[in-house]
Amino acid sequence: MASDLHTHTIFSDGSFSPEELIAAAKKIGLSYLGITDHDTVDGIAHLYENGLYPNKSINIIPGIEFSASNPDHDIHIVGYNIDIYNGNLLDKLNDVIEARWTRFSEILDKLQSNGLSIKETDVLKIAGTSRSIGRSHIARALVRNGCFKTVREAFDKMLQKGKPAYVPRYLLELEEIIELIHRAGGTAVLAHPKLIGDDNLVEEICTNHHIDAIEAFYPKHTVEDTNLYIETAKKFNLLITGGSDFHGTTSRYVKDLGEFTIEDKFAEQFYIESTV
């Protein structure tokens, strides 16, 4: 059997609702499914409040994905088995979401000042239920409005760092994220380490911070990368995990759920019966 512990829904920047994601996971026979939206647990809360989590036919691992503050590298931390109603976590997430909305307004101002036709409502139609508004939502709205042919072009010409509409976002410090996950009862995972772009930094994080696991299996990792991060996990006594980073859009690393999976033996280490 197979599992996927890194997926996203419409509550952040995915294109599947939580129900659609679960249905797709059931259809292809996944044993374990990690839902790890960016900066929000709203998708998991939605499932719980509608009687769909916990789920009898698939083992859902509640998660979240954070980006950590670093001037030179893109560091992401995934938290598994967090208490989605932890007060400290929710307070901090509200701060992050509020900062995202401020950034959203600033990016729109820059786009409009560069002569591009885009309004707040255009992006909100794309974002749907998501309170975690990001550049991907804005890029998709720009494509829908005919400003660019692809999301990649929108980023390359306007939204990425150094381009006219780029606005830096509020990010939590690495140690702050890890502590937040631990205080919410979760397991802190260093996500897609190859994308950090510096294996010395990966080793430093594993040495000096309280990481519990490393995402060794990932679509953009070569066999050599995966073996390196498995050895890193062994060296620092970390759990090994992995996932597809599925968003449900062709602009991501995998198009379809099930295209990239991990063995159940890795996933089952993170599964805890829900006490919510």
Image: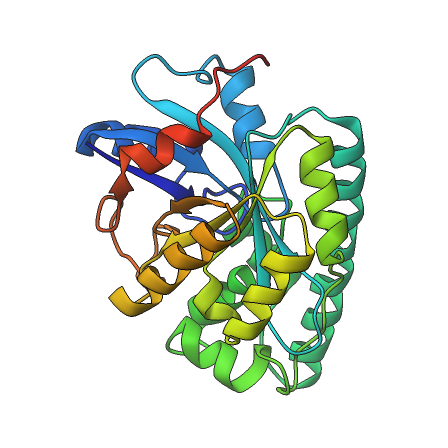
| Residue 34, percent from left and from top | 43, 36
Q: Nearer the viewer, residue 161 or 138?
A: 161
Q: Is residue 197 left or right of residue 86?
A: left
Q: Quadrant of the N terminus?
A: top left
Tell me if residue 66 comes above or below residue 136 in the rendering.
Answer: above
| Residue 19 visible at all | no
- Taking the spot 55% from the left edge, 29% from the top edge, the residue there is 81
Classify residue 167 by image quadrant: bottom right
Tell me if residue 48 comes above or below residue 42 in the rendering.
Answer: above
| Residue 172, percent from left and from top | 75, 56
Tell me if residue 208 comes above or below residue 21 in the rendering.
Answer: below
| Residue 36 visible at all | yes
Q: Is residue 146 left or right of residue 124?
A: left
| Residue 238, percent from left and from top | 50, 46
Q: Is residue 52 left or right of residue 78?
A: left
| Residue 266, percent from left and from top | 34, 37
- Taking the spot 42% from the left edge, 26% from the top edge, the residue there is 60
- Taking the spot 40% from the left edge, 47% from the top edge, the residue there is 15
Q: Quadrant of the C terminus?
A: top right
